[in-house]
Amino acid sequence: MHIDRADLAMLIDYTLLQPTATAEDVAALLADAKRLGVPTVCVSPSLLHATSDTELRVATVCGFPSGKHHPLIKATEARFAVQNGAVEIDVVADLGSVATKDEYALLSELVAIREAITDQVLLKVILETAAFDRETIEFAARTCAKAGANFVKTSTGFHPAGGASIEAVRILRDSVPASVGVKASGGIRDYDTACAMIEAGASRLGVSNAAAVLR
């Protein structure tokens, strides 16, 4: 599968989530995103202030990277992020609820977050698919869609089980309606991998080195 460079750039969330990142790093990210034609950046909540003057779409994370924060903390964090300029929220699901297939707990958490932000804000739910089998991924994806998520997402990039895989992207795509997007993230470092993820069903890519992917 061949994708035009400009079209590929439009599918990228250019991500800077390293714990040591600074406002100066964010400024460099924004400049690089503009140069490459990438429309969306994703930064840590504490660095949203460094994106206040950009015309790019700004995403941030909540419950990151473990997902073990209390649901009300996640909801509050998401709402606060929106009030500070984020238009997309990537939240880590409680992976214990995913592992045990506790639909009530997972739905309760995600609905609380969905209700804390407006419908205009995209909600992406990170599931750490590398840690789970097919049946568990299918359960989690269907529950996310039921809760009003706009995207289901493979990985944080920080979990020891690993990042995105072609198989996981296919499972996610097959498990949710066409109206729900699939974001592949974690370990996408070159053009061929990016194209393979899109061919498998990804409609967004989380990438920390967009220049390498678009080269």
Image (cartoon, helix red, strand yellow):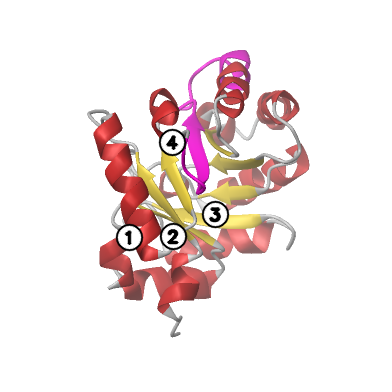
Mark 2 falls on what kind of element? loop
Task: Please provide percent x and percent y for residue 142.
Answer: 70, 48
Residue 91 forms part of the magenta stretch: no
User: CA gap, disc 1 to disc 3?
Assistant: 29 Å
| Viewer-closest of 201 and 36 | 36
Q: Residues within 10 Å of mark 1 (few under 14, many from 20)?
A: many
Q: Secondary structure at mark 4?
A: helix
Residue extending farthest to the left is: 20
Q: Which residue is mark 3?
A: 134
Residue labelled with disc 1: 210
* Residue at the image position 32 percent from the left and 38 percent from the top: 26
Taking the spot 49% from the left edge, 56% from the top edge, the residue there is 39
Location of residue 76 (image quadrant): top right
Residue 138 seen in the figure: yes
Q: Residue at x 41, y 60 (%)?
A: 165
Q: Earlier in the sequence, mark 3 or mark 2?
A: 2
Question: For the residues marked 1 and 2, what is the alpha-carbon distance in whole angstroms?
Answer: 8 Å
Q: Position of residue 7 (x, y in %)?
A: 50, 74
Q: Position of residue 117 (x, y in %)?
A: 70, 29
Q: Are marks 4 and 2 in contact (CB under 8 Å)?
A: no
Q: Earlier in the sequence, mark 1 or mark 4?
A: 4
Q: Earlier in the sequence, mark 3 or mark 4?
A: 4
Q: Amino acid at mark 3?
A: Arg
Q: Which residues are magenta?
A: 53-75
Give above or below for 145 relative to 79. Answer: below
Q: Which mark is residue 51?
A: 4
Answer with left or right where residue 43 lies relative to residue 204: left
Residue furthest bottom in the image: 2
Quadrant occupied by the C terminus? bottom left
Query: In the image, which disc is placed on residue 38?
Result: 2
Crowd band around label 3 with a 10 angstrom C-alpha radius: few (<14), some (14–19), many (20+)? some
> Which element type, helix, strand or loop, lies under badge 1?
helix
